Image (tube, helix red, strand yellow):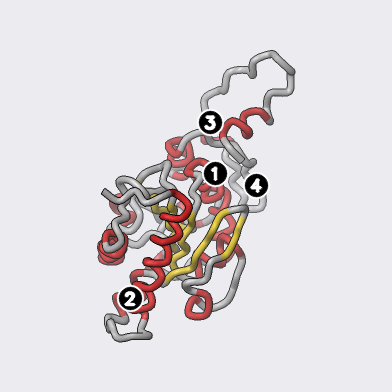
Amino acid sequence: MSNDQQLSLFNLSGSNPPAPRTAFDPNQIPQSATVPIPTGTYQTIEEIANHCNQCQRCELGQYRTHAVIGRGNPQAPIMIIGEAPGQNEDEQGLPFVGKSGQLLDKILASVQLSTEREVYISNAIRCRPPNNRTPVVTELEACKPYLLEQILLVNPKIILLTGATAVKSLIGDKRGITKIRGEWMEWNERLCMPIFHPAYLLRNPSREQGKPKWLMWQDIQAVRRKYDELIGDQRE
């Protein structure tokens, strides 16, 4: 749904203009993860960030330094969704800024994609779990409304899901990443592809055929081809 369509849902008075939007009150964020955040609540990424930095919908809000929202082009045609912030991300308030992020940027650059133009990066959850553990279901569900609102605002044509947690969080597929990586899926009229998490590639550095790094090279080339098919070749 486009922003114009979202706004039109609130114009119930025919030709009369809608009432001015009032300032956001962070105290009105539903503090229980069982209470949904209505679709179309946010008009900008900054509004999401303001709420997330005050959110207590799960216990992770007690431990964060910064809520980690996203980085890259907020109107990018490709959106990458990771799992959760790590220590570097929590300290800087940006996703994928540690060794995994450096590798991810190199992978994107290998097919002439960048966060300055074609890519926006976020995570399934905004706050770092203690000791970098895997997020639990309640945490993923508490944060999912923010992720869905981000997707609406960025409006990507392609979504890359890095690792099994990101896949499970967004589309509910619980299969292991090795079984579904590189497979195109459709979710809410958008093309999605599960890919290996860069941290997994750091633990498996071999470039031999059939190994994770070799498979990632096949996958990112497929992403580039699909991007060119959908958007047109924009390489300089």
Q: Amino acid at mark 3?
A: Asp
Which comes sooner in the sequence, label 2 or label 1?
1
Residue occupying the far top of the picture: 16
Callout 1 secondary element? helix
Mark 3 sits on what residue? 25
Q: CA distance from mark 2 to mark 1?
A: 30 Å
Q: CA distance from mark 3 to mark 1?
A: 21 Å
Taking depth in this image into account, of 230 and 20 the one nearest to the observer is 230
Taking depth in this image into account, of 47 and 17 the one nearest to the observer is 17
Mark 2 sits on what residue? 201
Which comes sooner in the sequence, label 2 or label 3?
3
Mark 4 vs mark 2: give the one in front. Answer: 2
Q: Is residue 143 above or below residue 211?
A: above
Q: CA distance from mark 4 to mark 2?
A: 35 Å
Numbered marks: total? 4
Q: Is residue 199 above or below residue 115?
A: below
Mark 4 sits on what residue? 36
Which comes sooner in the sequence, label 4 or label 3?
3
Taking depth in this image into account, of 1 and 28 the one nearest to the observer is 1
Mark 1 sits on what residue? 152
Q: CA distance from mark 2 to mark 3?
A: 42 Å
Q: Amino acid at mark 1?
A: Leu
Q: x, y (%) of residue 65?
A: 35, 51
Q: CA distance from mark 4 to mark 1?
A: 16 Å
Residue drawn at the location 33% of the way across and 51% of the way down: 94
Mark 3 vs mark 1: give the one in front. Answer: 1
Circle 3 Cα neighbour tier, 10 Å, few/some/many (<14 / 14–19 / ≥20)? few
Q: Amino acid at mark 2?
A: Leu
Residue drawn at the location 59% of the way across and 73% of the way down: 174
Residues at badges 4 and 3 in contact (C-beta under 8 Å)?
Answer: no
Q: Amino acid at mark 4?
A: Pro
Task: Please give left or right for residue 202 compared with residue 9 in the image.
Answer: left
